[in-house]
Image (spheres, rainbow, N blue to C red):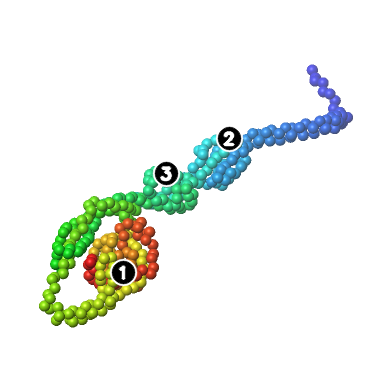
Amino acid sequence: MGVFQPEKTHDSKISSMSYALRWKHENLRQISTAAIVSIAVTIMILLLVNTSTRKQVYLVVDGQVKSIQTHKSVLQEVLEEQAISVKPHDQISMPLGGPLEDGDKVVIDRAVPVQLKVDGSTKNWYTTKDTVGDAIKEMGVALKETDKITPALTEPVTDKTDIRIVRINKQIVEREESLPFRVIKTSDPSLAKGEVRVIQKGTPGVMVQHIEKVYHDGQMVSKRMVGKEVKSKTLDKVVAVGTKKPAPVVVQTAVVKPTSTSTVKTSKAVSSNNRANKAGANFQYKKMIHVSMTAYSAGEPGIGTRTATGTRVTEGRTIAVDPKVIPLGWWVYIEGVGYRRAEDTGGAIKGNKIDIYYDSVKRANNFGRKSGLKVYVIGPVKPELN
């Protein structure tokens, strides 16, 4: 049994091609529209995906805010993308491997090297603190109120800031000074002229000085007297000097009279030559000068208690002079001041200048400078009271 095969003709092929061309022509607009819609949908999907993965992140580096947009999801990747390097001592507000969310703010504080010298040692440190005080606190160094800090605690920390802490300690010590007694001479008409009798023995007093010593890192840098008090008072020595004249010898009056007159005249001539009566004493002086005067005290830094002549400085006695003008060891009388002894010298004491000694620093400073004072240069022996 045979199979029936349809007859193929040239006309049937032409009909098929015509149908395809006709269908393509009729549906071309629909195909184009579908392609455009497909492309648009793809772009929208891509934009949607891109928008959903993009984040806006704020980086704050050393106080400077930078807003960036990124597709990265880890902080380390964002920093590498922005070419921002982080050192081991820098402080970051979140871990480098931490995930990032849209709107996150990341703060990076750069650490700077500082050097601290304290208690005889040197410490090198990295800090992100803003001020010297905060950096010292971060290093765990305890401060005292008396410490001297350079730079100041409120100063900002910069690269390679050098901090120095000086430990300052103060100590009050007591020092005893001997107070010399005075010798008071009184006239006694019951004693023969020239005879001397001690009525009361002299006893030196004792003064306690309170000396403040200042130490910087264990080394004493200054000392000054901050107070004083009398522990025991001086007891002046009282001496009676006879003034009773011997009985005159009548027999020798006529013979002695001319000689006596001559002697009296000579005595008067001598007394009229450089003689003065000051503060109850008659004396003959070598010369009289005018000087400018200042004052000093052992309580001042660098001033000792020993004079250039080896004596101990004593208020009411010691002055510093220029030995070329007033010899050391000589007594002088200063108008308005009294009797003083040249016992000390000074680098600034040149020419007609005198530095008078006081125990009290305050009194020495209040003395100021006085000019045109009259000074009688007497000699190595202090005049005796009349």
Residue, disc 2: 101
> Residue type at mark 2?
Glu
Rendered image quadrant of residue 138: top left
Whether 175 is drawn above or below 350: the answer is above
Name the mark nearer the viewer: 2 or 1.
1
First in residue order: circle 2 vs circle 1: 2
Residue hosting label 3: 137
Q: Nearer the viewer, residue 256 or 171?
A: 256
Q: Return the x and y of residue 93 as percentages of the image width and height.
A: 51, 39
Answer yes or no: is residue 301 visible. Answer: no
Placement of the C terminus among the 4 image quadrants = bottom left
Of badges 3 and 1, the one in the foreground is 1
Quadrant of the rendered structure where residue 330 is? bottom left
The secondary structure type at the circle numbered 1 is loop
Residue 335 visible in this rendered orientation of the protein: yes
Residue placed under numbered mark 1 in the picture: 321
- Whether 379 is drawn above or below 138: the answer is below
Type of residue at label 3? Answer: Lys
Quadrant for residue 371, please give it.
Answer: bottom left
In the picture, measured across the screen, residue 137 lies left or right of residue 327, that is right
Rounded to the nearest angstrom, the CA distance separating label 2 from label 3 is 35 Å
